[in-house]
Image (cartoon, rainbow, N blue to C red):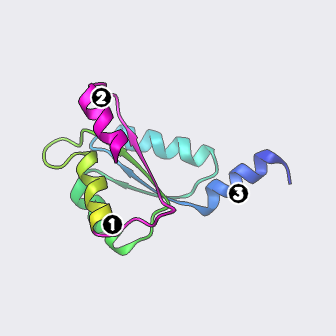
């Protein structure tokens, strides 16, 4: 098996959750993941939908925007998912953001 087909197979087996309040960005991220071989991809637009989805579904990789509009931000989503034990230890939570403030970056890094 070649290295490139191994990477595609690895992406193919994982489940993904994209959390962003901008639909076009969610769709773009989904397309990028699909081009890598992923196909189990769920898209949600806010923190509440993300928590609800994770309550009933296992997710291997979460791609979450920091700024989700009104209400909870990406940091809050991560904290709640951890508090409710909705992420497995093997799950990966990635904050995807254009935010550059030192306070936000350091807070995300701590968690």
Position in image of residue 99 (x %, y %): 30, 28
Q: Is residue 80 left or right of residue 7?
A: left
Pick whichever of labels 3 and 1 is earlier in the sequence.
3
Coordinates of residue 84 in the picture (x, y in percent): 28, 69
Is 90 or 15 nearer to us in this picture?
A: 90
Counting from the top left corner in percent of width and height, residue 37 is at 64, 51
**What residue is pinned by disc 1?**
53
Pointer 2 residue: 99
Q: What element carries label 1?
A: helix
**Badge 2 local density, few (<14 within 10 Å), some, or many (20+)?**
few
The range drawn in magenta is 84-111
Q: What element carries label 2?
A: loop
**Within-10-Å neighbours for mark 3: few <14, some 14–19, many 20+:** some
Q: Vertical placement of 13 versus 45: above or below? A: below
Q: Which marked residue is nearer to the observer: mark 2 or mark 3?
A: 2
Residue 109 vertical placement versus 39 (above, below): above
Judge whether residue 93 is colored magenta: yes
Q: Where 67 falls versus 88 (above or below)?
A: above
- Tell me which label, 1 or 2, sits earlier in the chain: 1
Q: Mark 3 points at which residue?
A: 9
Position of the N terminus, as image quadrant, is bottom right
Residue 17 in the image: state x and y as whole percent: 42, 56
Query: What residue is rendered at 40% in x and 71% in y?
Result: 57
Q: Does residue 7 appear left or right of residue 21 in this picture?
A: right
């Amino acid at each position: 098996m070649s290295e490139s087909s191994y990477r595609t197979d690895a992406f193919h087996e994982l489940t993904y959750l994209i959390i962003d309040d901008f639909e076009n960005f969610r769709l773009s991220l989904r397309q990028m993941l699909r081009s890598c071989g992923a196909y189990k991809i769920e898209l949600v637009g806010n923190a509440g939908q993300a928590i609800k989805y994770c309550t009933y579904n296992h997710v291997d990789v979460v791609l979450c925007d920091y700024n989700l509009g009104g209400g909870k931000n990406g940091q809050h989503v991560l904290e709640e998912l951890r508090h409710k034990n909705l992420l497995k230890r093997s799950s990966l939570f990635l904050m995807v953001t254009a935010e550059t403030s030192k306070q936000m970056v350091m807070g995300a890094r701590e968690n």
